[in-house]
Structure formats: C-alpha cells, structure tokens
Amino acid sequence: MWRVVVLVVVGLAVGEELPEDFVRCRQKDPNLNDCLKAAIPDALRKMRKGIPALAVPPLEPLLVAAINIHSGAGPVVLSQNYRHIQLHGLASTILTTYKADLPHYRLITNSMTPKMEFIADYVMKGRILVLPIQGKGIANVTMVNLVVKHDLIGEPVVRNGQTYMHIREYKVKFLPKRVYLHFTNLFNGDKRLGDQMNLFLNENSELVFNELKESYEKSLSSVFKNVTNTIFDKVPMNKIFIED
Ligand SMILES: *[C@@H]1O[C@H](CO)[C@@H](O)[C@H](O)[C@H]1NC(C)=O
Ligand SMILES: *[C@@H]1O[C@H](CO)[C@@H](O)[C@H](O)[C@H]1NC(C)=O
C-alpha cells in the first residue's frame, strides 16, 4: 500500500517518460534537426493505436468531436457543421524540414502527408459561386500530397521543479497538391442535383478549397495542438529533447 503511494508521488514529481521505443534526440546534438526529422514520423507511426500510458488517442484514425466552419465572404458563403470526424492518413506523414529553436520554445517544420482523408457527418447550407448548396450526410474531403507548414510556439511551464514545453500557439498552412470533395445526400437526397454539385465541386476544387482552407487550418491546428500537448504537458521537456 505505502509503496504504491510513494511510486505515485515520485511519478508526479518527475513527470512521465516518452514510450521506450521512441527515438530520443539530444538538445546538444549538432544534427538535432535531422534527428527530429526522422524521430517524429517514426513516433507518429508508433502512435497509430495511441499511447494509453500517456492518454494519447489513436492517430489512425484521429477522432475529432466537432468542427463548425462559417465562411462569410467572397465566392463561397457557407456554414458547415461536422460531427464524428475521422482523420485518416496522419500516421504516414513524413517531415521534409525541421527547425528546432529550443531556447525560444519554437518548432518549425514542413510535413508531407501522401493522402489525408477527412470523413465526417456534415450539415451545410450556403452558396458556392452562384450555386446554392445544402445537405446533410457524409462528407469526404481528401487531400493528396498534402504539404503542411507547421509553426509551434511554446512556452515553459514549471511544475514540481520540472519544465514542460507547453504549446501555446500552433499555426498550420495546408498546401495540398489535389483536393477531392464528396458529399452524400445533398439537396435532401436529390441524386441528380447532388451528382452535379459533386462534379462541380471537384472541377473547381482548387477555388472551393482555397475559400475554405483557412477555416480547416484553424480547426485542424487546434486538433494538432491538443495532440502535441497531450505529450508535451505530461513529459518534461528534457525527456523529449534530452539534455546532456
Ligand atoms: C474518400 O475519397 C477518396 C478520394 O476520392 C477515396 O479514395 C476514398 O476511398 C474515400 N473514402 C471513403 C471513406 O469513402
Ligand atoms: C482541445 O482540448 C480542449 C481541452 O481539453 C478541448 O476543450 C477542445 O475541444 C479540444 N479541441 C479540439 C479541436 O479537439
């Protein structure tokens, strides 16, 4: 009984550890950026089923409860509510560049995800160019060869004598090579109108996506921030970026 209590107290005081099979990178390594560039995609693959010990959710798929998007200006005026969102493909992400500025708690990286599928229950209503659109069904927004620019701005949080690198702001920019959009049950299930609209959306997917991009970026960056902080708020910074 006493032993359990002591272990728990010690565990809290020193913080959690990264899973043993994660690659460790050292802060003083002159090739720290290269080390992280390889270590992070490796960690993402190992997070496919989540990390129960750290309460990190599975990445394949990553479940998100809800995202509400209201775009009010320009050629696309649309209110979209997504529920039961599944993001598929994140665990296959690779990093193309990495720049860690640990003294300033800043991480800047570019990634490439070969195929990211965003599948969700949707309700939407609005107008795209001159066409009214409305529906309630299942949405599939698939981004192929998706380059993402990540900018993580952190700050030190000291707890029980340990410094944690809490991510305060997580900015992303999405640059997909191609976007495929598909919405089931548009126009109350009118198949002809629905098929036409899906065709139209895909023929104009670059324009449509550019109008919606900022909203997706804002919503998904907060998802990425949450996932990062589930690790960074539990594992002290010097156990993520090893101090010699
Ligand atoms: C979503 O759309 C992509 C591209 O058209 C397709 O490859 C994928 O199978 C679709 N996913 C689902 C769950 O329908
Ligand atoms: C992020 O986490 C906060 C706090 O746990 C939660 O309120 C919020 O809904 C989460 N956001 C997303 C997009 O998952």
Image (spheres, rainbow, N blue to C red):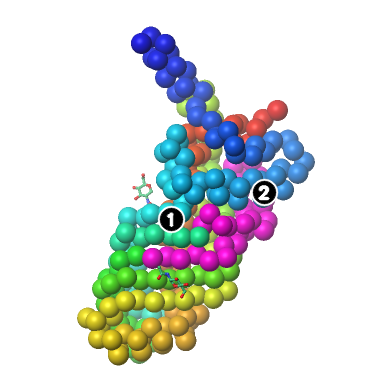
Question: Which label belongs to residue 61?
Answer: 1
Asked if residue 158 can be seen in this view, the reply is: no
Is 222 covered by the magenta stretch?
no
Residue 102 on the magenta segment = yes
* Rendered residue at 60%/62% (across/down): 112
- Most foreground residue, 124 or 69: 124
CA gap, disc 2 to disc 1? 22 Å
Q: Residue furthest right?
A: 30
Q: Is residue 119 left or right of residue 163?
A: left
Res 128 seen here:
yes
State the predominant SS element of the stretch in magenta. Answer: strand
Residue with the most extreme top position: 2
**Whole-percent x, y for residue 59 in the image:** 46, 51
Mark 2 = which residue?
A: 38
Q: For the residue marked with disc 1, what is the amino acid?
A: Pro
Give the tally of numbered discs.
2
